Amino acid sequence: KIVCDGKPVGQGAGEKKVKPVLLAVNKPRGVVCTTSDKDRAMNVVELIHYPVRVYPVGRLDKDSEGLLLMTNQGDLANEIMHAGNFHEKEYIVTVDQPFNSAFIKKMQEGVELKELEVTTRTCKVKALGKKTFQITLTQGLNRQIRRMCEALGYHVVTLKRVRIMNIHLGRLNTGDYRRVTPQELEELQWQLEQARMEREEEES
């Protein structure tokens, strides 16, 4: 609490406590998640212009679209982003050329990313068309799906995140947002609690 001349200032000012906010946003392509001035593109905070200060939970790169969570709760953001928790994130991806079953198998089993000196975790991959597939990751490496595809000779044309844990993008229009429902939040907190308990068991 900060007091100046006997009056509270900053976050401690006034009687009102800021209510917790968790939003599901459908981020369009071309919008960035950072609030730095390095990229002249519009950032997602400006896009939704929410009345309470909220910030992105994790990242979705400029050329990607789809589900992004935004919140004013630092603890919740950190727990969702904790890669060690193996939280699922689901994407729909279209590449520049038709792929075969060998491509799906390699993506599932893990791809060596030489520039990051890492092999990706095993994941779920399902073909949706000749050039389109669904992939569910439990890992959040920088530009991971794009790097995985490039390592196998493919270039990502479109990449859309459709789910983070139990929260689905659904029919939310591009550029729109909605508040996460109480039921979704309850399920999300239950999943985070389970992950926390598992982590504590492993550490003990």
Image: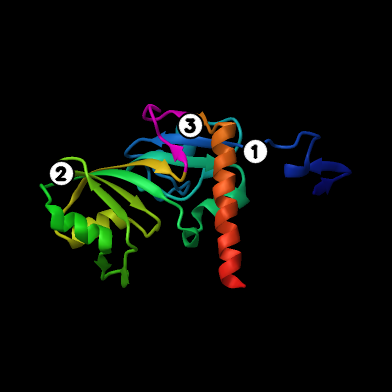
Q: Which residue is mark 3?
A: 48
Q: Is residue 128 left or right of residue 69?
A: left
Image coordinates of residue 99 in percent, x first then y, are: 12, 50
Residue 63 at least partly seen = no
Q: Nearer the viewer, residue 45 or 73?
A: 73
Measure how far apart labels 1 and 2 are at the Cα level.
Answer: 41 Å
Q: Quadrant of the C terminus?
A: bottom right
**What secondary structure is found at the residue carrying circle 1?**
loop
Q: Which comes before the other along the chain, label 1 or label 2?
A: 1
- Magenta-drawn segment: 166-177
Q: Which comes before the other along the chain, label 3 or label 1?
A: 1
Local crowd size for mark 3, using a 10 Å CA cut-off: few (<14), some (14–19), many (≥20): some
Q: Residue at x 44, y 41 (%)?
A: 68
Tell me the amino acid under the disc marked 2. Answer: Lys
Image coordinates of residue 69 in percent, x first then y, are: 48, 41
Local crowd size for mark 2, using a 10 Å CA cut-off: few (<14), some (14–19), many (≥20): some
Q: Which residue is mark 1?
A: 20
Residue 67 at least partly seen = yes
Image coordinates of residue 46 in percent, x first then y, are: 47, 35
Tell me the amino acid under the disc marked 3. Answer: Ile
Measure how far apart labels 2 and 3 are at the Cα level.
Answer: 32 Å
Nearer the viewer's eye, disc 3 or disc 1? 1
**What secondary structure is found at the residue carrying circle 3?**
helix
**What secondary structure is found at the residue carrying circle 2?**
loop
107 is higher (above) or lower (below) than 136: below
Q: Which residue is mark 2?
A: 131
Q: From this viewpoint, which residue is outermost toward the right? A: 6
